Amino acid sequence: MSGVEYKVQRLKLKGLGIFRSRKTPDLADVLNAHASDGWRLHSIFKAPAAFGDSDSLELVFERQVS
């Protein structure tokens, strides 16, 4: 029987405080790295934030398992 498995990765968009200039990963690089392992992007959304706007995205990947 085959099924589907999921994986969630948080992608930080910017640094906070003194780390504000931190380099953020390129979205295409992240997607291609997961695709090479058989993962497909299922959905993407802003991560919940307690105060103000979120500084990260949640990427949900899926792949077939046998």
Image (tube, helix red, strand yellow):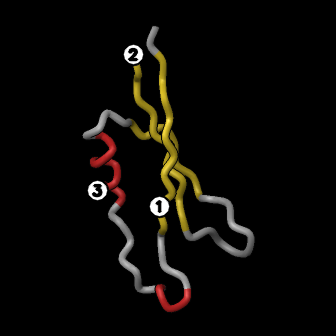
Q: Quadrant of the C terminus?
A: top left
Question: Which residue is at 35% across, 66% downward?
Answer: 25
Between 54 and 64, which is closer to the camera in this rendering?
64
Q: Name the residue under label 3.
A: 29
| Mark 1 surroundings: few (<14), some (14-19) or many (≥20) residues within 10 A | some
Q: What element carries label 3?
A: helix
Q: Where does the image place residue 4, in percent across and percent down from the top left?
A: 48, 24
- Tell me the CA gap for discs 1 and 2: 28 Å
**Of the pair 28 and 20, the residue shown nearer to us:** 20
Which residue lies at the image location 47% right of the left edge and 70% below the top edge? Answer: 13
Is 61 situated left or right of 23 in this image? right
Mark 3 is surrounded, within 10 Å at the Cα level, by few (under 14), some (14 to 19) or many (20 or more) other residues, namely few
Q: Which label sits on residue 66?
A: 2
The answer to the question of whether label 3 and label 1 lie on touching residues, with beta carbons closer than 8 A, is no
> Is the residue under label 3 in contact with that under label 2 (CB below 8 Å)?
no
Q: Which label sits in the foreground, 2 or 3?
A: 2
Residue annotated with mark 1: 11
Q: Is mark 2 on a helix, strand or loop?
A: loop
Residue at the image point whose x is 30% and y is 40% from the top: 35
Q: Which of marks 1 and 2 is in front?
A: 2
Q: Residues within 10 Å of mark 2 (few under 14, many from 20)?
A: few
Residue 44 spot, x, y in % from top left: 52, 48
Sequence order check: which comes first, mark 2 or mark 3?
3
Image coordinates for residue 45, horizontal then vertical, percent: 57, 52
Q: Could you tell me the amino acid type at mark 2?
A: Ser
Query: Hey, what amino acid is under mark 3?
Result: Asp
